[in-house]
C-alpha cells in the first residue's frame, strides 16, 4: 500500500499521505486497511463479516477508499451514501470550514485543491461509524 502512495503524483503525494493517515488514525477499531478496487481501502474483514460484499461475497465489505486521480484526490465513504443524517451533517460542517463548494457524488468526496482538505472534519467523519454499525446499516440497505 505504501507503493500506492509512492506512485501518487508529487503534487498530491504529501496531502494524500496525510489524508490516509488521518483516516487510519480516526477509524474505530475493527476496520482493516487493504487494497481494494485499486485504491487504499478500509474494510470490514471477512473474519468479522463472513458474508462479504453482496456483489462479490468473497470480498471484504468496503467502507472507505482513497484514491489520487489525475485531477483530484478522492475519498469514498459508503456511510455517507447509506446514511442521510450523516450526509447532511457532513455537508453542513463542510460548508462551515471550507471556503470552496463541496464537490461530491453519492459516496465520493473530491478534492481538486488539496489545500482545502478539512483534515479535522474528515477525522471526525470517519470516526462516527463502527464496523458493527456499518454492518447493520449495510444490511438494512440491502433489505430495502
Image: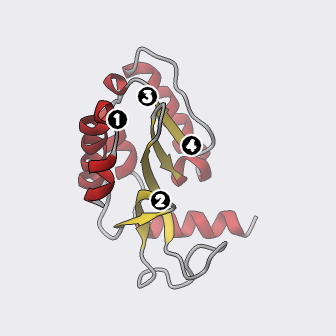
Split into 4 quadrants, where in the image is the C terminus? bottom right
> Residue 38: percent from the left, percent from the top?
47, 59
Q: Nearer the viewer, residue 73 or 71?
A: 71
Q: CA distance from mark 4 to mark 1?
A: 16 Å
Q: Secondary structure at mark 4?
A: helix
Residue position marked by numbered label 2 in the rendering? 38
Query: Which sits earlier in the primary sequence, circle 4 or circle 3?
Result: 4
Structure colour scheme: secondary structure
Q: For mark 3, what is the residue?
A: 93
**How far is the residue under mark 2 from the one under mark 3?**
29 Å
Q: Is residue 114 above or below residue 101?
A: below
Q: Which residue is mark 1?
A: 121
Spatial distance from mark 2 to mark 4, Cα to Cα? 29 Å
Give the mark nearer the N terminus: 3 vs 1: 3
Q: CA distance from mark 1 to mark 2?
A: 25 Å
Say which quadrant the N terminus sits in.
bottom left
Amino acid at each position: 500500500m505504501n507503493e500506492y502512495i509512492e506512485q501518487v503524483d508529487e503534487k498530491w503525494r504529501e496531502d494524500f499521505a496525510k489524508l490516509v493517515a488521518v483516516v487510519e488514525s480516526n477509524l474505530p477499531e475493527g476496520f482493516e486497511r487493504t487494497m481494494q478496487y485499486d485504491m487504499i481501502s478500509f474494510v470490514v474483514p471477512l473474519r468479522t463479516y463472513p458474508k462479504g460484499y453482496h456483489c462479490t461475497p468473497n470480498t471484504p465489505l468496503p467502507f472507505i477508499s482513497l484514491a489520487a486521480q489525475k485531477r483530484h484526490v478522492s475519498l469514498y465513504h459508503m456511510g455517507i451514501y447509506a446514511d442521510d443524517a450523516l450526509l447532511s451533517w457532513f455537508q453542513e460542517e463542510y460548508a462551515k470550514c471550507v471556503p470552496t463548494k463541496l464537490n461530491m457524488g453519492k459516496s465520493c468526496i473530491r478534492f481538486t485543491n488539496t489545500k482545502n482538505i478539512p483534515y479535522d472534519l474528515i477525522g471526525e467523519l470517519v470516526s462516527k461509524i463502527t464496523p458493527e454499525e456499518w454492518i447493520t446499516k449495510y444490511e438494512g440497505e440491502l433489505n430495502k
